[in-house]
Image (cartoon, rainbow, N blue to C red):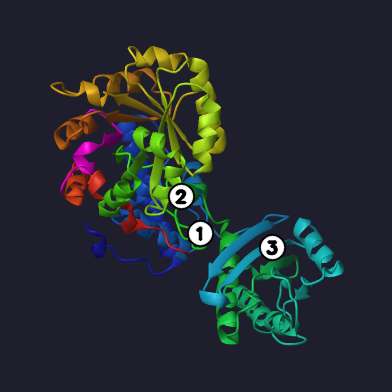
Amino acid sequence: MSEKDVKKPETREEFVKILTDAVKKEVEARSVLSGRSAKPTISGTAKILGVHRDTLYSWLKEFNVDFEEVVNDFLSGKVSDHRQPSDECAYLIGEALVGEGNEVAHIDLLMGNKDGPVGEAFANGLAHLSMGHTPLLAVIRPNLPPKPHTLLVPKVTVKNLDDANKIFGPAQAAVAKAIADAVEEGIIPKEKVDDWVVVCSVFVHPKASDYRKIYHYNYSATKMALKRAIAKYPTLEKVFYDKDRAKHPMMGYKVPRLWRPPYLQISLDAPDIERTKKVIAQIPRSDRIILEAGTPLIKRYGTKVISDIREVAKDVFVIADLKTLDVGKVEVDIAYEETADGVIAAGLAPAETLDSFIYEAKRLGIYAAVDMLNVEDPVKKLKALKDFPDIVIIHRGIDQETGKTIGLEPIQELKQTFKDKKFLIAVAGGIIPETAKEALEKGADIIVVGRYVTQSRDIERSVREFLELTPEMREDIDVYRVHVE
């Protein structure tokens, strides 16, 4: 069944029913395959429904349904309409960003009982005024507040009457109307309107000038934040699914992580930064690409070359081939300061150096790789370490390549020996598409390529030869890029 043949549910009740049925089928299917009970996933449930997982995510959001709650209710045998909450002391949190330009709206809110922590925050906010951030009650019009009563807190300092008019006018009205509509539409339970209060933090840019847009965007953002608070959005599964796909709109670039192998790592070894930039400019865009600041490049220009690479490849994962043999912590720090996403040490380094190298990289939140070039027993070396690297590189040096085939046997040995560890295996040394394909089939996560790409007359074509090797590498995550909701 193709997704275009699947009919979208018309009501929330219909959606919950078909979702529960799909969860049941997935539990049964997984139990048959594994011989034991297994918890359903959004991906597996989407497959049973015949839709893409992103479509299922959008339905969950639209119908205000928590997937984890549906699963837990099914597994426990509980029947639920998945309406939110009836707890004695609610403490609900919601957030939403809507709009564009100077009128963009960003809402953070708390909602809960008057006699709980949210009620205490409400009273404190109303009683303790702050210069430039004076809280005020949201009102639909003067003398008509919505229920639950809502305290509006300006995020941006109000410096003059023009700023105040935007807060006390369209922003205040938008928040109040969204609260009232949310009650009327059943988003906020009507029986809770006299028990709950809302604290709503509102962003209005000093240069915002279009009152209609200020109202329009703040209304939508407040409504969305309320729905999310009630639904306890997001689920952990949603966070894990989106965190490496999403791009924060205010940053202007994404932070790449190696969460979805296989990858193609292009080693930029030529000690010429201008030539290197020309090579990078010809590499096709793909989330499967890693750029390596090669050792000769770093030796000539220092780790500053990492920042130079960022000028032409700001969204790409950049790893610095430091080939560290001593002072592991110091070298990690130097590369980190130039925004390296990962660093490479030589496996020939003493265990103490590698321990320091790996510790420091993980402390700073970047990837630690160990290159096993000329290491006779990689397994023994890794067992001697206190902590495990994020990447292990099986490597044959340039001077060893002629007339030899790359040894791929260690891939499975490493995976079997350290199956309790989470790490990636990279293969380097004279890699061409034929050996790359074999390495991927044997379980390699990263293919490291140098001269085949960088010295090619047609760099883009050479890169695409590798990106066409597997269905996964042909699929660019940009197709499924998570946008601002």
Left or right: where 57 falls relative to 222? left
* Amino acid on which disc 1 is placed: Met
Q: Residue furthest right?
A: 127
User: Is 443 part of what is drawn in magenta?
Assistant: yes
Which mark is first along the chain, 1 or 3?
Answer: 3
* Amino acid on which disc 2 is placed: Val
Give the CA distance from mark 2 to mark 1: 10 Å
Residue 152: give x, y in percent of width and height: 72, 72
* Residue occupied by mark 1: 251
Disc number lying in front (3 or 2): 2
Rendered image: mark on residue 111: 3
Give the CA distance from mark 3 to mark 2: 32 Å
Residue at image location 64% in from the left, 64% down from the top: 108
Q: Which residues are magenta?
A: 442-457
Which mark is first along the chain, 2 or 3?
Answer: 3
Disc number lying in front (3 or 1): 1
Q: Is residue 407 visible?
A: no
| Quadrant location of the N terminus in the rendered image | bottom left
* Residue occupied by mark 2: 255
Residue at image location 13% in from the left, 21% down from the top: 403
Left or right: where 389 falls relative to 187? left
User: Is 430 part of what is drawn in magenta?
Assistant: no
